[in-house]
Each structure stands twice: as C-alpha cells, then as structure tokens.
Amino acid sequence: MTTSLRTRLILGIVGGMVLLLTIFILTVYILIQRALVNQFDSALLSTARILAASVETDANTIDLEDVQNMPEFNDPKYQTYYQIWEQDGKVMARSPFLGTDNLPRLEGSLNNGVFNKLTGRDRPERAVGLKFLPRSETGNESSSQPAANDKILILTVARGAGDLYNQLGLLRWLLFLASAIVIALSVLIAAFVVRQGLRPLHSIASEIAAVREDDLAARIGTASIPAEILPIKNRLNDLLSRLEGAFKREKRFTADVAHELRNPLAGIRSTIEVNLTRTRDITEYRSALSECLEIVENMQTMVNNLLLLARLDAKQISFQGEQVRLAELVNSCWRPLSKEATNHKITFENRIDPKITCESDRQNLAIILSNILENAVEYTDEGGQIRATGRQGEGSVEITVSNTGCRLNNEQAAQVFDCFWRGDSSRKDAGVHCGLGLALVDRIIKALGGSTTAEVENGGIFKIRLTLPAK
Amino acid sequence: MRLLVIEDYRPLQQSLLKGLREAGFAVDTAADGQEGLWYALNNDYDVIILDLMLPGIDGLKILKELRSKGRQSHVLILTAKDTLQDRITGLDQGADDYLIKPFEFKELLARVRALLRRSYRQKNPQIKIKDLRIDLTTQKVWRGRNEVDLTPREYALLEYLAMRAGEPISRTDIWEHVYEFKSAASSNVVDVYIGYLRRKIERPDKPLLIHTIRGRGYLLEGQP
C-alpha cells in the first residue's frame, strides 16, 4: 500500500467513482434492455396470438388462409416467420420465407408464450413459442373444452431483432464511453481537489522548513488552516515554544558561564600585566602569584561544578545506595566550615536525631549538605546562628537547614536554586561564589529522587528543606 | 589626576589600584554600589572606572544617579557584559567609554588618558608651554632641551596644572585631583609640592612658569 496521502485519496475517490458508475450504468442498461425487449416481445406475442387465432383446422389439414392475408407474414421486410407443429412434432405449416430452415420448437403453455433469442441464422432474431387450440372449420366455436389434446398445436413465431440488438449495442457503447469520460474527468478533478485540499499541508511543510534553529521565535500557520490540521499546527507550535524556551535558557546559561569566567580571567590578566610593568622584588611577585593561584582555584571549582551540572543534566552520573546516618554526615560536612564560622561568631547546632537514616548516595549527599552549609555560613550575619533539623516521615526523610540574617524575600528565595543567581547585597567575597552551589543541590536532590524548597521566615530566617526518599 | 575604581571583584580591584597608582594616578576604590556612589558623589573625580554588576546598587543606576546630579566625571564602564545591547545601553546612559573584561591593562591606561585629555579639552598628548614640554603618554617632561626628572607625585601635580594652564587653580582643587581620599595629606602639602616642582622646572635664566596668585592658588603660564 502506498504511503502517499495524495495517491491514496485519488485512488479512493476514483475507485469509488468507478464502482458507483458501474452499478449505475449496469442498472440503467438492464432496465432499458428489459423495456426494449419486453416491448419487442409483447408485439411478437400479439402477432403470434393473432396468427394462432387465424388458424383453422379440420381433421388433418390446417387452413392458413387468413394468415396468408396478414401483411407481416407476406412481406419479407417485416422479417417475421412462423412454424406450426403438431404435438407429436410433425410440421404442419411454416412461413414461406423460411425455405428449408426450421425454427426451434418452443413449447409454451396454452396461450402463454415463451421467448427466446435465436442466433442460428444470419441475423439475430427473437422468437415466441406458444401452444394453441386452433379453431375448427366445422364451426364448433367451443374452445373451452378442447375435444382432444392432440388437437393442440405448437407455434413459434420469430422476428428479426437486428435493430433491437444494434440499438442495445449502441447503448452499451454510449454508456461505456460516457463512463470512461466521467472516470477520466474524475481522475483530473480528484487530482485537483486533492492537491487543493492538501495545499495547507504543503504550506505548513514549507513553513516548518523555513524555521531556522537560530530563530525559534517563528510560529507556524499564520495563514488560515483547516480544522483537521489545527491540532498538528498547535502541537508543533507548542513544541517550538518549548524548544525556544530551552534554547533561550541554554543561551543564557552559556552567556552566564562566559560572564562568570570573564571576571576571574580579567583578575588574573590584570594582576599579571600590572606586575610585569616593572621589575619588582620577590615578595611582590610571590603575592601576585598566590593571588593568581587563588583565582585559578576558584575557577577550577566553578568549572567542576559546571561539569557536574552538565553530567547531571545528561544523566551521566550513577548513584550508589547505602545506609547513611544523616546527623553524622551533617557533622562531617560542617567540620571544614567551622573555622570560618567561628571567625564570624556564627554558632551551629545539629539537632538531627542520630537514629535517622536514609538509603542514598553518601558522596553526593555530602556535596549537597556541604553546599547548603557553606551557603549558610556565607550569608549568616555576624554572630548569627545555623541550625540543622531532621524528621523521619513515612517513606521519606526531611532535613532542614536554617540560618539567621537573611535579607531575601520569599520571591527571591524561590530563585536561589537558579544557576548564577546570587542573593546580591553584602557579598563578602565576590568571585569566590558564583551562584552554582544551590543550583547543584537542587539538581542532585532531584537526581536522587527527592526535592528542595527554600523559604524565608519572619526575622530573616532562611530555610532550605530537603526531602529524600528513605529507601 | 584622580580616579575612582568601583569594582567588587577583589583581585581585579587590587590589581587595578596598583597599576593605576603606579601610572601616576590618585586612585580610590569602592567594592559595592552604595560605597561607590557615595565616593562618586562626594569627590570630584576625573575618571570613574565602573563595573556594572555590583552588589548593592548596580553600575547603571550609579551612572544614572551621577548624571542626574550633574556630575561631569568621565565614566569608563569596565564589565564582562559584552553584548551590543549592553554596550549601547551603557553608553546611552551617559558613560564615556566601555571596555569588556578581560582587557589589556595598557589599553585601559590609554583609554583613561584619552578620557583625561577630553576632560580638559586637550586633544594633543604633548603639551607645550613656552619651552616646557610634557608628554602625557610617556609622562616625560622637558625644559628646553633638558629632560626634567620628576617623581610621580610631582608629575601628577604638573600634569594637572598643565591641563588647566592659563587659569588660576585653588589649592583645594589641586588637592582633590592629585591626592587620594584616604591619604593623610592636607592642602598644605600642595604648597610643599609646588615648591619641589618649582625647584625642578624653573630656571633663573628663563621666564617664570608657575605663578602664585594670592588668595586664589596657583597658575601655570598659559601661552605656548
């Protein structure tokens, strides 16, 4: 089966046309043929009846005097012949034009004819056969009760039907020709209609072809579109919107990455250039080099984070499941931060029940907790407080890390998981944190089958809540 | 010449500070928007080097604020934002120049010098006053055929006087344009440095160049 919609439609339309035409034409032909033949036959039958009525018999002979006076049987132009038999098959009389030919003996019932088409002679003829009771010459008119069955005669009357069959042949040809023309025309019309009908598809196709990957703002179907294609158009446009959104996010992300890399690069470059402007003593070079090293270390962290994000997005990271004691893990993640926290007089309180465990990937869970705690230390006010709490739910575990000194509102808090988003205001260390830590937290948690929320409570308490599946 | 660097990324801020100071400028720095705006509004800087993405108040807002308050300081935007639209917005908001990070320090210096020349309507990077010749690019000074060896501070003072040659300049003006905000110097220091400068530039056999104008300050001869 062809897959071309156009061919299918054309074949369907033309096939239907052919079928309908055939049925219609056959019906018309049969009706006309029947009417013509019936007309012919009834004329033939009445001729035969007249002939039968004109025949008189006595004991052994037949009187055809009246018949011989009937013009049909005396003029060859009427092409009408008869033959009369007795019941035993003996020919009683025949038309003089028949010569030695015999007509077939058609035995109809009494007074009712049977018809047949004859093709034996040089032209087609139709014949009617009937049985009749001839009048008796004795004048006994009573035919209600035939004296004897052997008086019954058999008559066949035939008439040339060349004209009838020629007419029917012509009719056949006419109908055939007409239907051939109609079908040929219907192929053309179907092709035209189908082409017109499918034009919106072509125009949509060319519109789709015109969509370029660098300009996804274009939408399909600005022109009028048939209702059947509307869903396709709408779905395509939805798809385009989603693609456009994804490309935009991708572009913005790339731009953000470039931007975030430019700052440290500018730092390294200008540190080096400034120090190269003149000869300096060794301590100056040393401090310049260690400054550059610090910048490079921060860049490295950022690049690692970006790589991790990319791998998470591409689902290229596999997780191992093991029983993790959360309180313990939080403590071990806090340890490297405690010195910095002490410097800023920040106190930390781990209130997670030591019994709470969950089955998860320890290493990635550690990245999550470290990032959250690091973020908390970064943004807690001097002398503030960080607190971790835990709750074992049904089939899930919840960890909440809260810190004081938050200056965000709830709307901003919802953005903390976006890449490169920063809480702004008083960053202590521009360039060290580039706004990837919490984005990573969010992506890893999702990859582990959990979720994150962030909110700000009254009094500037910032809360990040992690929900993890217990198993 | 006095500059302000508003830049929150510390390593960059510090290297700019060092490089610009070594190039003979008096440089103040600010690490966030509020501080930057305060400095910019309360001092008369010749050139402000402005980052756009700043904590507190962002760079464009600072620029707008400065221009709406009628500050004439030349502003050079130094940012990682590199799109055409960013550059157009920055310049249209009243910036005088736009440089994208990372940048070459020499180019930054050249652009700062160009802005300074523009501030004082001094198209020619060589200033000639009588037989005194100052090359603003190489920062070399000649009196007649003899090169004069000046310390950076003396050069800065001379450059400022030369940029405004022919008009009397108050001690406060000199102090504001040659000394940094955080320096302990007071305007008396100006007299001391004028003394040093005179000793190096004036010749007994040549006409006097730096005049003291009683009650108003100093004036460097204006006729070439």
Image (cartoon, coloured by chain):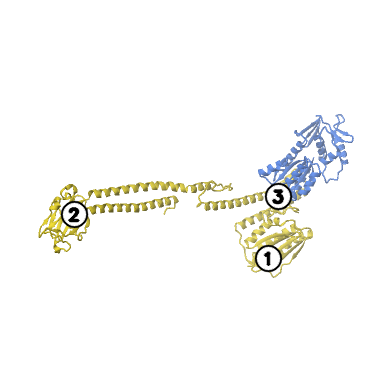
Depth order, front residue of B119/B63: B63
Question: Between residues B207 and B214, which one lies in front from this camera angle?
Answer: B214
Question: Can residue A454 be seen from the camera position used here?
Answer: yes
The numbered mark, 2 or 1, whose residue comes first in the sequence reads: 2
Which x, y percent locates residue A281? Answer: 78, 47
Q: Nearer the viewer, mark 2 or mark 1?
A: 2
Instruction: Specify the amino acid type for callout 1.
Output: Glu
Return the residue at label 3. Answer: A264
The blue-tinted chain is B
In the shown orientation, is residue A16 left or right of residue A150?
right
Considering the numbered disc 2 on the image, is that residue within a helix, a strand or a loop? helix
Q: Nearer the viewer, residue A351 or B21?
A: A351
A222 sits to left or right of A442: left
For the image shown, how many numbered marks are present on the structure? 3
> Which label sits on residue A11?
none
Q: Give me the C-alpha separation between circle 2 and circle 1.
A: 115 Å
Q: Which residue is mark 1?
A: A398
Q: Residues within 10 Å of mark 1 (few under 14, many from 20)?
A: many
Residue under disc 3 on the same chain as residue under disc 2:
yes
Chain A, hue in figure: yellow
Indicate which disc, 1 or 3, sits on the residue closer to the N terminus: 3
Q: Would you name the residue on which mark 2 appears?
A: A50
Q: Earlier in the sequence, mark 3 or mark 2?
A: 2
Where the N terminus of chain A falls, by quadrant?
bottom left
Extreme residue toward the left, this view: A60
Q: Secondary structure at mark 1?
A: strand
Q: Which quadrant would the C terminus of chain A be assigned to in this image? A: bottom right
What amino acid type is highlighted by mark number 3?
Pro
For mark 3, give the secondary structure: helix
For the residues labelled 1 and 3, the Cα–Cα distance comes to 37 Å
